Image (cartoon, rainbow, N blue to C red):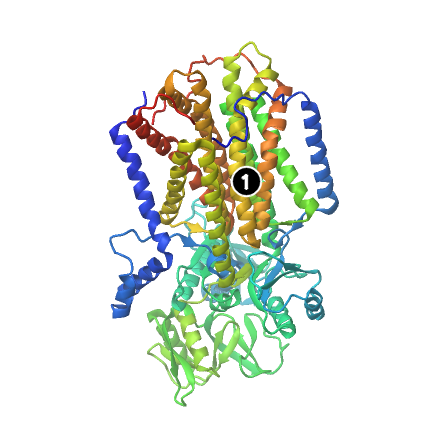
């Protein structure tokens, strides 16, 4: 009749004990957190007596995973950024022009002279003086195309070339645009991660969302604007040949050139060639330093190919100026004095020490491949988070006690069994949350409170059923058995449907809502487990010891 | 002596006026939807874009002065409300300022936030900005879509699940109850103009889950009793089933409400709207599982000839052992 195999009993207790053990660190949150931090620091920076003391606050053999607190509980900044992937198309096309020019030059006999025309940013238009040679020109430029590997576009190439009259048009193919978008976002993600890591905040969340968005959450940072200052700068460094220098903001730059302002000489504008000689991507190092006059500067070093390009260019253009351009502003435009072969140099400008340090960090982390647009930003002050935690704690405890008392009053001894199960249940939720590294949010706390209220449902169903069966069944053991059996389908159906909604919430929601879905979903799993295994085991053990002739539920 | 909210054996007749109850529900839905159509929901920035700033200061909140300080900025529709909460101390005077999405700006402008903070600090130097949230119109549009989709998907998934586990009449009854609960919740949010944001969508889905939980328990008993009392009227079977599960329905509603009410009173103002939605949902969800779901079932009628043989255990999970 009422029998549970020994191995099942052991397994059930084992699950409960493990769950509670995993939940335990959360009861000593600050201590464990300090200990974990200290251990991480020791690994990174070596041992110090203070770190050791902090690390030993929590025994090493104990589980030490904690529930992550969401931004709404800990305070911090949240940003949703959209990567402007189209930015990349323009620079790709700019870089194409010298290649096209060099490819068409040997064909001068058939195509005649070539001229770059005005065009939208994502394509290149070239006028050739002998339209009869167009088919040859198209053929030659097509030869520059590179095959790309995509899931759908097997055999497609990165550019589309077409000729109409005397105009040759080159644009990026759709397949290449897709591939490029993906690369751009991934690159941006990586660079944002590096920049945030350089600043050294704890547990930042940096995630890709959808095709072209990046979600950034950094706990403990003062405000979203601070975060934006760190990651929002493109830090696109290029070295471009200077065509002319002037003070006219509306000067005509000419095709293939660009008019950009100087960063610290107001009213001064440079016309530069749009295609850079070298870009910041080829930097291998950048460090804050000082120039020969003791002013803050940034020294840099190129990689081999960058060094060669830079060396060749300086050798060929001694006496002419070139511009160091950062995010579309000229930092400085020195005249090349001599051949610079080593690939290292120094950027001077009107920097403060802090600015030169920041610039070095940004250059080292790499430039963002494209601009970012911020679609959503949230700053939550740490006080608000702490208030929410405190309020949540009190509310949870009161809810808990109210339900415990109510259950004990309603079901007597069986109510106490259900109460023990409820306590184990909440312990299991925290244990699971810590183990899977889930994030607890304010709605998540609400989810736990709701679970406390609803978790007893399964037990209520069973107890009510036992009451009913007591009226008809032969003896209490049979009634208990039937109660569990018959309540099972209602329990499963009811919980599966709620679980479905939790899963949908998790899939569709974000941030705090997702936190709610997690606690709700886990709460359903643990409450079903505790109701149909744990309380049952307790009741069976009690029944075996006492062998009561009658029971009252 | 045990605490008993419901007597041991009840035999209330829930369906003597079932048409009246259905009519009443329909009327309430119509009132709610009329309110929704007439004044609409008080959407938070999640759904319509804009910026909210939560301020805290030892000085009392002076809404008029705040407004005067911000007026020169020309930000369009600005709403300022003082927040009261029993958990606040004497030196915590909290206000919520909501600024509409700025014309023509796709993304969030830091400028606006800085201007507002400077203007308010000019009025009250001790003021602190404990949270600042901005959502651009692009994202808010998508959030609306996702939210609607989530609710529709949840209801659809449930419809399918109940259809598979019961019969289509049960599924329709359950879904009618869900739609009833969601409609009434939207109705009361519109009527009382409580802020409707992303968290409320989570609450809506929880209400869907809870109401369903209740409905399924009743239906499960109906299915069992349909096999047990083959000769009885559907109406009687429904009445017996609801009476048999009444004690459980009340118990679970009470424990859930106990938990929710303590959260409502003590949980702070940030989640109060969210908790309010759930409390409301538990009440209408409990009501609807009897007076809507079961009444619809009665109206539709069910197939009485269950092909599966009825055994003592009565269901396919009966062999599962602990």
Q: Residue furthest top?
A: B231
Query: Residue A344 location, x and y as percent?
Result: 35, 78
Question: Which of the 4 quarters of the picture holds residue A376?
Answer: bottom right
Is A551 above or below relative to A506? above
Query: Residue A263 location, x and y as percent?
Result: 53, 79
- Which quadrant is home to the N terminus of chain A? top left
Asked if residue B315 can be seen in this view, the reply is no
Q: How many residues crowd around disc 1 within 10 Å: few (fewer than 14), some, or many (20 or more)?
A: many
A207 or B51: which is nearer to us? B51
Disc tally is: 1
The secondary structure type at the circle numbered 1 is helix
Which residue corresponds to the image point at 24% horizontal and 68% vertical from the top-left? Answer: A47
Query: Residue A113 location, x and y as percent?
Result: 53, 67
Question: Which of the 4 quarters of the picture holds residue A34?
Answer: bottom left
Q: Residue furthest bottom?
A: A293
The chain letter under disc 1 is: B
Q: Residue furthest front?
A: B1
A306 or B57: which is nearer to us? B57
Which residue corresponds to the image point at 45% horizontal and 61% vertical from the top-left? Answer: A218
Q: Which residue is mark 1?
A: B257
Is B157 above or below relative to A372? above
Query: Residue B275 location, x and y as percent?
Result: 56, 46
Q: Is B76 displayed left or right of B222 in the figure?
A: right
- Which quadrant is home to the C terminus of chain A? top left
Asked if residue A547 can be seen in this view, the reply is yes
């Amino acid at each position: 009749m009422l029998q549970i195999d020994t191995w099942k009993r052991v397994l059930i207790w084992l699950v409960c004990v493990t769950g509670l053990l995993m939940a335990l660190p959360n009861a000593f949150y600050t201590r464990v957190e300090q200990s974990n931090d200290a251990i991480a620091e020791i690994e990174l920076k070596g041992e110090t007596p203070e770190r050791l003391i902090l690390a030993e606050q929590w025994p090493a053999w104990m589980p030490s995973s904690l529930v992550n607190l969401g931004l709404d509980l800990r305070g911090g900044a949240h940003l949703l950024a959209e990567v402007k992937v189209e930015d990349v198309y323009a620079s790709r096309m700019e870089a194409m022009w010298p290649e096209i020019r060099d490819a068409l030059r040997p064909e001068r006999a058939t195509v005649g002279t070539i001229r770059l025309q005005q065009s939208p940013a994502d394509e290149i238009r070239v006028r050739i003086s002998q339209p009869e040679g167009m088919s040859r020109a198209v053929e030659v430029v097509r030869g520059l195309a590179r095959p790309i590997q995509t899931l759908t576009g097997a055999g497609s190439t990165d550019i589309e070339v077409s000729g109409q009259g005397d105009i040759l048009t080159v644009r990026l193919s759709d397949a290449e645009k897709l591939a490029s978008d993906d690369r751009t976002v991934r690159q941006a993600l990586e660079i944002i991660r590096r920049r945030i890591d350089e600043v050294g905040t704890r547990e930042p969340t940096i995630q890709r969302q959808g095709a072209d968005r990046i979600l950034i959450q950094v706990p403990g940072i003062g405000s979203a604007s601070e975060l934006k200052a760190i990651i929002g700068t493109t830090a696109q460094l290029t070295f471009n040949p200077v065509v002319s220098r002037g003070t006219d903001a509306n000067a005509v730059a000419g095709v293939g050139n660009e008019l950009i302002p100087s960063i610290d000489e107001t009213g001064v504008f440079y016309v530069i060639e749009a295609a850079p000689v070298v870009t910041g991507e080829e930097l291998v190092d950048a460090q804050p330093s000082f120039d020969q006059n003791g002013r803050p500067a940034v020294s840099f070093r190129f990689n081999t190919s960058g060094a060669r390009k830079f060396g060749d260019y300086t050798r060929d253009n001694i006496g002419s100026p070139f511009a160091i351009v950062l995010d579309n502003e000229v930092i400085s435009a020195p005249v090349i004095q001599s051949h610079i072969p080593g690939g290292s140099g120094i950027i001077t400008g009107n920097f403060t020490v802090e600015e030169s340090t920041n610039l070095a960090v940004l250059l080292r982390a790499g430039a963002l491949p494209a601009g970012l647009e911020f679609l959503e930003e949230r700053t939550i002050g740490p006080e608000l988070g702490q208030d929410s935690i405190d309020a949540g704690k009190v509310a949870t405890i009161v809810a808990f006690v109210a339900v415990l008392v109510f259950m004990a009053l309603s079901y007597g001894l069986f109510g106490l069994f259900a109460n023990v199960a409820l306590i184990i249940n909440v312990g299991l939720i925290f244990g699971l949350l810590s183990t899977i590294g889930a994030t607890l949010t304010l709605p998540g706390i609400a989810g736990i409170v709701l679970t406390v209220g609803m978790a007893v449902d399964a037990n209520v169903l069973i107890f009510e059923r036992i009451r009913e069966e007591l009226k008809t069944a032969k003896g209490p053991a049979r009634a208990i058995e039937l109660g569990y059996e018959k309540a099972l389908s209602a329990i499963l159906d009811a919980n599966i449907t709620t679980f479905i909604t939790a899963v949908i919430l998790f899939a569709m929601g974000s941030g705090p809502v997702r936190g709610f879905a997690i606690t709700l979903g886990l709460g359903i799993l643990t409450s079903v487990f505790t109701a149909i295994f744990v309380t049952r085991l307790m009741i069976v053990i009690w029944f075996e010891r006492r062998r009561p002739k009658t029971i009252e539920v | 002596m045990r605490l008993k909210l419901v007597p041991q054996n009840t035999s209330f007749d829930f369906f003597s006026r079932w048409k009246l109850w259905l009519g009443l529900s329909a009327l309430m839905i119509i009132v709610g939807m009329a309110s929704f159509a007439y004044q609409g929901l008080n959407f938070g920035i999640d759904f319509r874009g804009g910026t909210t700033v939560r301020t805290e200061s030892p000085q009392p909140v002076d809404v008029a002065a705040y407004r005067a300080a911000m007026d020169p900025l020309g930000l369009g529709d600005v709403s300022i409300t003082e927040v009261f909460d029993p958990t606040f101390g004497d030196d915590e005077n909290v206000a919520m300022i909501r600024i509409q999405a700025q014309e023509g700006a796709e993304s969030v402008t830091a400028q606006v936030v800085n201007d507002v903070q400077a203007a308010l600090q000019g009025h009250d130097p001790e003021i602190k900005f404990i949270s600042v949230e901005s959502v651009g119109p692009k994202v808010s549009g998508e959030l609306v879509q996702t939210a609607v989709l989530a609710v529709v998907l949840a209801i659809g998934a449930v419809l399918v699940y109940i259809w598979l586990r019961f019969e289509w009449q049960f599924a329709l009854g359950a879904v009618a109850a869900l739609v009833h609960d969601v409609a009434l919740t939207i109705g009361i949010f519109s009527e009382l103009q409580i802020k409707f944001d992303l968290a409320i969508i989570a609450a809506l889905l929880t209400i869907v889950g809870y109401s369903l939980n209740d409905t399924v328990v009743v239906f499960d008993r109906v299915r069992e009793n349909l096999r047990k009392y083959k000769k009885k009227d559907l109406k009687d079977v429904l009445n017996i089933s609801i009476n048999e599960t009444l004690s459980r329905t009340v118990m679970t509603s009470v424990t859930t409400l106990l938990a929710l009410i303590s959260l409502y009173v003590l949980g702070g103002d940030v989640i109060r709207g969210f908790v309010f939605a759930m409390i409301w949902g538990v009440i209408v969800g409990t009501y609807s599982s009897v007076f809507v779901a079961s009444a619809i079932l009665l109206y539709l009628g069910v197939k009485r000839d269950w092909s599966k043989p009825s055994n003592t255990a009565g269901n396919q999970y009966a062999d599962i052992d602990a």
